[in-house]
Amino acid sequence: MIKVGVFGAGHLGKFHLNNWKEIKGVELVGFFDPNDAIAGDVQNKYQVRRFLNEEELMDACHAVDIIAPTNIHFDLCEKAIKKGKHVFVEKPLANTMAEAKELVNLVKESNIKLQVGHVERFNPAYLSIRDLQPTPMFIEVHRLAQFNPRGTEVSVILDLMIHDIDIILSIVKSDVKNISANGVAVMTETPDIASVRIEFNNGCVANLTSSRISMKKMRKMRLFQKDAYIGIDFLNKKTEIIRLKTPDDIDSFSFDLDTSDGKKSISISNPQAPEVNAIKMELEKFCDSIINNKTPVVSEVDGYRAMDVAHQILKKIKLNSITN
Ligand SMILES: NC(=O)c1ccc[n+]([C@@H]2O[C@H](COP(=O)([O-])OP(=O)(O)OC[C@H]3O[C@@H](n4cnc5c(N)ncnc54)[C@H](O)[C@@H]3O)[C@@H](O)[C@H]2O)c1
């Protein structure tokens, strides 16, 4: 039985508490949240023990789940790792690159597993195409959300775009060569809307647009590669693949096009997205990494790499705002 303690019972923390209660082989020991109003409400609704001392909860657990504000991630992670506890921490891994680097080093020197909450890796739409191992040369991403003060202590890059950065880094097996970026702070002190171009050494180019001041929601990624177009709709959990027909495309809709070298058959398919609860699945995979001594699906190094690109983007945006 893995004993788990939850740190932070706000908006997302409540989802985590509910999911932990359903995961087999886990004992939810309790939670710590310094906000009395939130903690009282959670105690009543979820029937989970509230700890008033964070160290006491850590000592009672094998693993901690950190869903506190980003500026507290480092402090809680460091304490837990030094106590030899496994850590699940929400994205972004930490507030600064120095903190993220220190966490990577601490994990390396320890015997614990650390997983970062890049939950889109478990989105059914992404899961339905992941095994195809896409090799895109061109990527277009739009992640648009309506304004919500929650999460605005960090820029839209660290709040929303970091999800797409992590997915792109997991797909494109090449180093980043160059980044161009521009962003505007409209409702908060940090960029609320941004347009970014990431060029990779293998020639792949990714264009990302993120906004948290949009009138409508959208979370779409489009991958273009030599033999296919792959559309991933994270919001509606649907995928679409359009490609030159192969003998394997037996279930797909297809039509012929006249080209200069004769007729070509195009197939359109919508791979079935598995019916999974992404949060429950990421927590289950975290437990699996502990039990079976595996590298977590989204490791501390993945969390660091996503943050590294995000911070390079923020630097470019800052530079542009100074020169303009
Ligand atoms: N993966 C995702 O898609 C996703 C989505 C939303 C938020 N997040 C991340 O989750 C984290 C929390 O976001 P939220 O929307 O739930 O915020 P929230 O403000 O609703 O909740 C944060 C909670 O942490 C508590 N807290 C403050 N200091 C604490 C401490 N020292 N120890 C324990 N708890 C403490 C607060 O009282 C609050 O209840 C952030 O890091 C955010 O980036 C991730």
Image: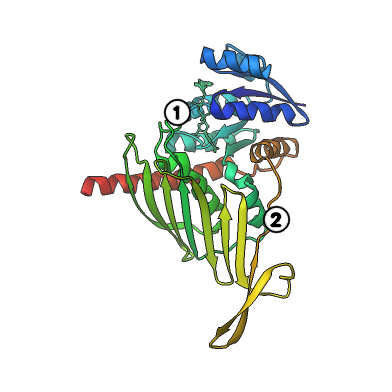
Q: Which residue is mark 2?
A: 272
Dot in front, 1 or 2? 2
Image: 20 above or below 124: above
Residue 288 - label: none
Q: Which residue is mark 1?
A: 71
Instruction: List the single residue furthest toward the front.
Output: 215
First in sequence: mark 1 or mark 2? 1
Which residue is depicted at the point 49% across and 29% down? Answer: 74
Residue 67 visible in rendering: no
Which residue is depicted at the point 62% across and 30% down? Answer: 15
Residue 250 visible in rendering: yes
Mark 1 and mark 2 residues within 8 Å of each other at the beta carbon:
no
Q: Amino acid at mark 1?
A: Asn
Q: Amino acid at mark 2?
A: Gln
Which residue is depicted at the point 66% across and 73% down? Answer: 254
Q: CA distance from mark 1 to mark 2?
A: 38 Å
Q: Secondary structure at mark 1?
A: helix
For the residue pair 308 and 191, the one nearer the viewer reads as: 191
